[in-house]
Image (cartoon, helix red, strand yellow):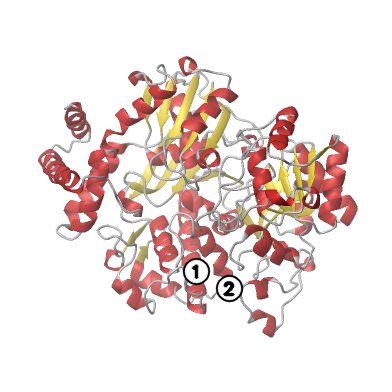
């Protein structure tokens, strides 16, 4: 859970608390993708990294 | 104070170590793992840097990572949000990687560092520097200037794609930024992709292809793709690009505008591709010139530092120099992401060590030590390694080494040259180089097809003695890192006939266009490296001896590798490349090897040993 605390602290420093609920949503959806895929694979697309 | 800089997890991982602000060592991980553009944690490069400094993990005071992962994640999330619902496929593929790994980069770094040494993995030691600040620091702090304008241009880091900074003494501050998705680097990469080359490594080929074409599409690019203001600031028209949401760089509107789908790498190059290369090159030069002119007017600064991947565009750099707005220009030789490791380390050092006089450490010609920052090998070690590899060699003194190598070059031999410390950055500068005689009308073809196994349209670069550069090229400035392009002197050139002009690729390159045809591009330009006695005395002595023999103070200098292979690092790597290609003569330290004296059973199929880049 320390990652969530760090993210919260980061958003505070960036004055972007409005992103927090979205971030949680994205993390949940993304987490589901991880679980459904079983392995972490991504294409080598320039801007994603 | 010992600071270790790290860049990793995207491409070209690297490590750099500085002690009290002075660079001790820097190297890319790919040279050790033998995987081109290796993005993995640079465990070997770190081990090397520590050994070069004779330091252990306990001795390291700070570790600096070259970018801020959370900031990058923020950009990703906001981009998906801005373009939703399109981009779902890209989101679906990117998120697992971020959630499974990249978001936890601090933990990953600490874990990897602890595995090297528990003391390295202490959390308080780890600092993060912004991507563009790392680039800017890598150019400004090693430069010979106490004040300078610093321009960084690349694809994208966290948010910034172009940034201007001002360096004053030990202080460096970013003053302006252009943010993603508006990116000159990504625009160039879109054309790299569209003309059939690999993004992140093929940009150099597009630049090499440009002189074959006419900038016929430049107006269309300015009219539709990029809106450039007089001060050089710009915005891309995202209707033509798909890199924000898609899995490719360009989309159907882009293809419709430029006459068809992107070229596949196996398809032949046509005049249209050459014209596209010439067009994007012309646009890039125009944007860079507008930026440097306006920033020069605004700041009044007479020194310029360049970094970021776009700073490897040596044709644009040459135009900025000739534009005359700056008295001197310093370009970080590792201008790409590998250099971020060095910049991050320097940024952290200066952040924590402000000097009372406010000055930074300055050395002439710069603090990069000729970019010779990698491993070197003692003569006894070289002999052991070569013996173990089965090489047959003779050991000669320094004078015989220079004399025999210069004679081999004058006799038209392809020479492998492995001397001293390895270079940091993408260019070989006379530490790990393949050398040849630039006067030879056949050398270009022989090196391209039998030694390098690479595309035939790309010319080689010349190394020239600094004192003699103005006699052979339209340049009278230092270019130690092969990052400036200038024309061959007109009195050394020969005009091509209309028939010869119409040729392409190696046929055109093979036309005798100058006294040094092997390093003269079809537009009579050359990508020049000036060689300095102070930074590489052995290479300087070799070119001087070659001049005594031939009257020519210029050599072909190309990287010591074959296509797709990282540049050689160790004597064993050099021997393997020597035996796998048609290099005829190899000098490693004071050992000399002739191909015809080697055991033919040690030859290997090197041509197909590496994935093409």
From the viewer's perspective, is B400 left or right of B600? right
In the image, residue B132 sits, relative to residue B349, either above or below, namely below
- Residue occupying the far bottom of the picture: B499
**Residue B335 visible from this viewpoint:** yes
Q: Is residue B429 visible?
A: no
First of labels 1, 2 by sequence position: 2
Farthest-out residue, top: B58
Kindly identify which numbered label has been placed on residue B238.
none
Q: Nearer the viewer, residue B324 or B503?
A: B503
Out of B513 and B379, give the one closest to the viewer. B379
Judge by depth and name the residue closer to the eye, B102 or B137. Answer: B102
The residue that mark 2 highlights is B212
Q: What is the chain letter for disc 2?
A: B
What residue is at 86 percent from the left and 34 percent from the top?
B397
Q: Residues within 10 Å of mark 2 (few under 14, many from 20)?
A: many
The answer to whether B450 appears left or right of B28 in the picture is: right
Q: Which residue is mark 1?
A: B277
Disc 1 sits on a residue from what chain?
A: B
Q: Position of residue B180 (x, y in %)?
A: 31, 52
Q: Position of residue B602 (x, y in %)?
A: 68, 48
Q: Report whether B141 appears left or right of B517.
A: left
Mark 1 vs 2: CB contact within 8 A: yes
* Residue at point 55%, 42% (across, down): B332
- Eyeballing the image, is B501 above or below B346? below
């Amino acid at each position: 859970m320390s990652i969530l605390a760090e993210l919260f602290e980061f958003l505070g420093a960036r004055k972007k608390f409005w992103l927090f609920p979205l971030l949680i949503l994205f993390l949940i959806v993304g987490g589901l993708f991880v679980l459904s895929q079983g392995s972490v694979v991504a294409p080598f697309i320039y801007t994603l990294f | 104070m010992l600071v270790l800089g790290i860049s990793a997890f995207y491409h070209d991982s690297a490590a750099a170590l500085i002690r009290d602000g002075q660079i001790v060592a820097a190297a890319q991980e790919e040279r050790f793992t033998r995987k081109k553009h290796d993005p993995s944690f640079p465990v070997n490069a770190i081990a090397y840097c520590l050994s070069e400094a004779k330091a252990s993990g306990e001795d390291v005071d700070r570790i600096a990572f070259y970018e801020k992962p959370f900031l990058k994640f923020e950009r990703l999330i906001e981009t998906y949000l801005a373009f939703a619902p399109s981009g779902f496929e890209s989101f679906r593929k990117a998120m697992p990687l971020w959630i499974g790994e990249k978001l936890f980069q601090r933990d990953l770094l600490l874990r990897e560092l602890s595995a090297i040494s528990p003391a390295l993995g202490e959390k308080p030691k780890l600092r993060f520097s912004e991507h563009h600040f790392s680039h800017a620091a890598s150019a400004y702090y090693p430069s010979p200037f106490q004040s300078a304008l610093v321009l960084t241009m690349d694809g994208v880091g966290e948010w910034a794609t172009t940034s201007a900074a001002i360096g004053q003494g030990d202080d460096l501050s970013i003053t302006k930024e252009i943010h993603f998705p508006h990116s000159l680097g990504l625009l160039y990469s879109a054309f790299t992709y569209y003309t059939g080359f690999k993004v992140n490594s093929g940009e150099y080929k597009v630049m090499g292809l440009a002189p074959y074409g006419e900038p016929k599409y430049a107006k269309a690019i300015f009219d539709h793709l990029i809106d450039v203001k007089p001060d050089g600031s710009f915005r891309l028209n995202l209707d033509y690009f798909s890199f924000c949401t898609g899995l490719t760089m360009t989309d159907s509107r882009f293809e419709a505008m430029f006459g068809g789908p992107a070229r596949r790498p196996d398809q032949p190059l046509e005049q249209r591709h050459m014209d596209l290369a010439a067009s994007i090159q012309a646009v890039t030069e125009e944007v860079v010139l507008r930026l440097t002119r306006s920033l020069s007017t605004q700041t009044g600064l007479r020194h310029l530092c360049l970094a970021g991947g776009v700073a490897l565009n040596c044709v644009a750099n040459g135009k900025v120099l000739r534009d005359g707005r700056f008295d001197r220009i310093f370009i970080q030789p590792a201008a790409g992401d590998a250099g971020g490791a060095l910049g991050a380390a320097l940024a952290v050092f200066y952040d924590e060590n402000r000097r009372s006089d406010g000055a930074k450490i300055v050395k002439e010609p710069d603090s990069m030590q000729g970019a010779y920052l990698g491993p070197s090998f003692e003569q006894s070690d070289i002999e052991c390694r070569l013996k173990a590899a089965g090489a047959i060699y003779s050991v000669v003194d320094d004078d015989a080494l220079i004399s025999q190598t210069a004679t081999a070059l004058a006799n038209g031999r392809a020479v492998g040259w492995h001397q001293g410390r390895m270079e940091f950055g993408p260019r070989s500068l006379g530490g790990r180089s393949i050398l040849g005689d630039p006067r030879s009308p056949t050398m270009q073809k022989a090196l391209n097809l039998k030694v390098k196994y690479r595309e035939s349209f790309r010319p080689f670069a010349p190394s020239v003695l600094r004192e003699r550069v103005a006699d052979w090229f339209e340049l009278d400035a230092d270019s130690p890192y092969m990052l400036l392009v200038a024309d061959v002197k007109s009195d050394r050139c020969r005009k091509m006939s209309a028939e010869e002009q119409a040729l392409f690729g190696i046929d055109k390159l093979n036309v005798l266009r100058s006294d040094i045809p092997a390093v003269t591009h079809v537009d009579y330009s050359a990508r020049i490296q000036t060689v300095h006695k102070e930074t590489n005395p052995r290479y300087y002595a070799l070119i001087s001896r070659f001049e005594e023999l031939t009257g020519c103070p210029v050599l072909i200098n190309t990287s010591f590798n074959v296509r797709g292979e990282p540049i050689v690092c160790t004597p064993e790597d050099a021997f393997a490349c020597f035996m796998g290609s048609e290099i005829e003569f190899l000098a490693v330290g004071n050992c000399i090897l002739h191909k015809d004296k080697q055991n033919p059973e040690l030859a290997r199929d090197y041509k197909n040993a590496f994935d093409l880049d």
